Each structure stands twice: as C-alpha cells, then as structure tokens.
Image: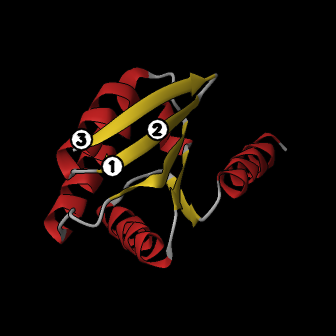
Amino acid sequence: MAAIEIKIIDDLLIATVSGTLTAAEVIEVVNEYYPGGVVRNVIWDLTHGSLHFISHEGFRSIAKAAKEAGASGIRRNGKTVYVGSNEIECGLLSMYTAIAEVTGVAAKYEVFTTIREAEDWIVLAVDKQVA
C-alpha cells in the first residue's frame, strides 16, 4: 500500500507516491480526479514509490479506467508524465504507456527520471498547443 499526496495547480495534478503502489490505488486516483473537467495534465512522481507489484492485467485495468475517465473531458488533450527513480521503474512505466496507447487512452504519455524533466515536458507540450 502506498501513500499518495495529491496537489492540483491550475489544470495540473501532481500525484506524489511513497511506497508500493497498487493498480486499485491508481484507478482510485484516476476515477476521482480525471473526469472532473479540471485536470488536463498529470505528473505521477514515483521517485519514492514503486509499482513493481502491478501485474500486466493491473496495467491494462489502469489503462481502461484512464480511457473511460478521460473520454469526454478535458483530459482528451492532456499529457501524463511518469517519473521513475531507476531503470526498472522507468521500464515498467514505459510498458504501461504502450498499453495505454494500444487501449486508446487519448492523453499523451512520457517517462522521465526527474521531476524537472517532467515539468519541462508539460510546459513545452502546453506551449506547443497554444502556438
């Protein structure tokens, strides 16, 4: 079980995870915050957390929930960034992004190893949308 701290700044949700994350915990955050029409972009900070116990089926369930939660709202054009602390976590996060894309989740995904890179990518992506 993980502790998840949620912070919302404008249309950006930052989920900071400490501990071992489960698919059910991710889905709970997705269902609570993604469909509300406020959150467009998301950063999942896993630098102090882990998702290595989430199964392939768990990742597919997360992708299905993300697709359903974001289908009709502002998340349709959103960006989601995952920040992993090591090569294994980043590999799992990259695997999830591929599952999400195949599932048809409308948000764009990226994986980085630092929060700074994640924030820069979100800002760059938003700036490109405005231009």
The residue lying toward the viewer, choosing from 43 and 80, is 43
Element marked by disc 3: helix
The secondary structure type at the circle numbered 2 is strand
Q: Which mark is residue 7?
A: none
Q: Is residue 24 above or below residue 35?
A: below
Instruction: Measuring from the top left, give residue 129's x and y in whole percent.
Output: 74, 45
The residue to which callout 1 is attached is 19
Residue at point 24%, 34% (across, down): 28
Left or right placement of residue 123 versus residue 103 in this view: right
Q: Nearer the viewer, residue 42 or 70?
A: 42
Residue 57, horizontal then vertical, whole percent:
14, 65
Give me the residue at 18% from left, 44% from top.
Answer: 24
> Residue drawn 44% across and 51% down?
106
The Cα atoms of the two marked residues, 2 and 1, are separated by 13 Å
- Amino acid type of the residue tagged 2 in the rendering: Ala
Q: Residue at x 33, y 37 (%)?
A: 3
The residue where tag 2 is placed is 15
Distance, label 3 to label 1, CA atoms, is 12 Å
- Quadrant of residue 54 in the image? bottom left
Identify which amino acid the numbered label 1 is placed on.
Gly
Q: Tell me which amino acid carries mark 3.
A: Glu
State the separation of the CA atoms marked 3 and 2. Answer: 11 Å
SS class, disc 1: strand
Q: Quadrant of residue 31?
A: top left
